[in-house]
Image (tube, rainbow, N blue to C red):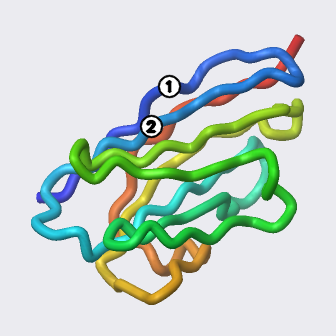
């Protein structure tokens, strides 16, 4: 049984930083991908960043490059999303997801991902 558990969300001031984590369990090899998505109130879910657990290759939403960084710790089966220079428009529920459809480069379409965590709230406000 695959399980994803997000943590690390919270309230942060504009310009601040936050790191959210995704702990994955049930995966018996590194041939899977983890994606981070977010959904703000009244908006559709959008892809943020993803990573191949086997080789660490990443893919990120162009508008977030330079502020958001995804990384992994295979020993802990954990993926991190480091978010810097946060803006009020980054406020959303952040979800991690997993796909067993291994690709040379992960993609940010939610259709690709089969398993989802419960989400963690990130609020950027003064």
Q: Total of numbered circles in the picture?
A: 2
Residue under label 2, please give it: 21
Above or below residue 70? Residue 52 is: below
Examine the image and state in which quarter residue 103 appears.
bottom left
Above or below residue 37? Residue 57 is: below
Q: Position of residue 96 (x, y in %)?
A: 46, 52
Q: Position of residue 120 (x, y in %)?
A: 52, 33
Q: Residue at x 57, y 44 (%)?
A: 81
The quadrant in which the C terminus is found is top right
**Mark 2 or 1 closer to N-term?**
1
Q: Residue at x 26, y 49 (%)?
A: 77
Q: Residue at x 61, y 73 (%)?
A: 108
Residue under label 1, please give it: 8
The quadrant in which the N terminus is found is bottom left
Above or below residue 95? Residue 111 is: below
Q: Residue at x 79, y 48 (%)?
A: 42
Examine the image and state in which quarter residue 28 appears.
bottom left
Asked if the residue at tag 1 contacts the one at tag 2, i.e. Cβ–Cβ closer than 8 Å, the answer is: yes
Examine the image and state in which quarter residue 121 appears.
top right
Disc 2 residue crowd, few under 14, some 14–19, many 20+, Cα 10 Å: many
Disc 1 residue crowd, few under 14, some 14–19, many 20+, Cα 10 Å: some
Q: Position of residue 95 (x, y in %)?
A: 51, 48
For this view, does 105 lie left or right of residue 10?
left
What separation in Å lies between label 2 and label 1 (alpha carbons)? 6 Å
Kindly state the secondary structure of the residue where label 2 is placed.
strand
For this view, does 20 lie left or right of residue 17?
left
Mark identifier at residue 75: none
For this view, does 63 lie left or right of residue 41?
right
In front: 37, or 21? 21
Q: Residue furthest bottom?
A: 104
Kindly state the secondary structure of the residue where label 1 is placed.
loop
């Amino acid at each position: 049984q695959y399980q994803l558990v997000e943590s690390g969300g919270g309230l942060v001031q504009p310009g601040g930083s936050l790191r959210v984590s995704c702990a994955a369990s049930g995966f018996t090899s590194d041939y899977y991908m983890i994606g981070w998505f977010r959904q703000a109130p009244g908006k559709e879910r959008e892809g943020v960043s993803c990573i191949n657990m086997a080789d660490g290759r990443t893919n990120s939403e162009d508008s977030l490059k330079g502020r958001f960084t995804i990384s992994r710790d295979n020993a802990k089966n954990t993926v991190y999303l480091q978010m810097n220079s946060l803006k009020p428009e980054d406020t959303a529920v952040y979800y991690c997801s997993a796909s067993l459809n291994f690709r040379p480069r992960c993609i940010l379409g939610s259709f690709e991902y089969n398993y989802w965590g419960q989400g963690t709230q990130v609020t950027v406000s003064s």
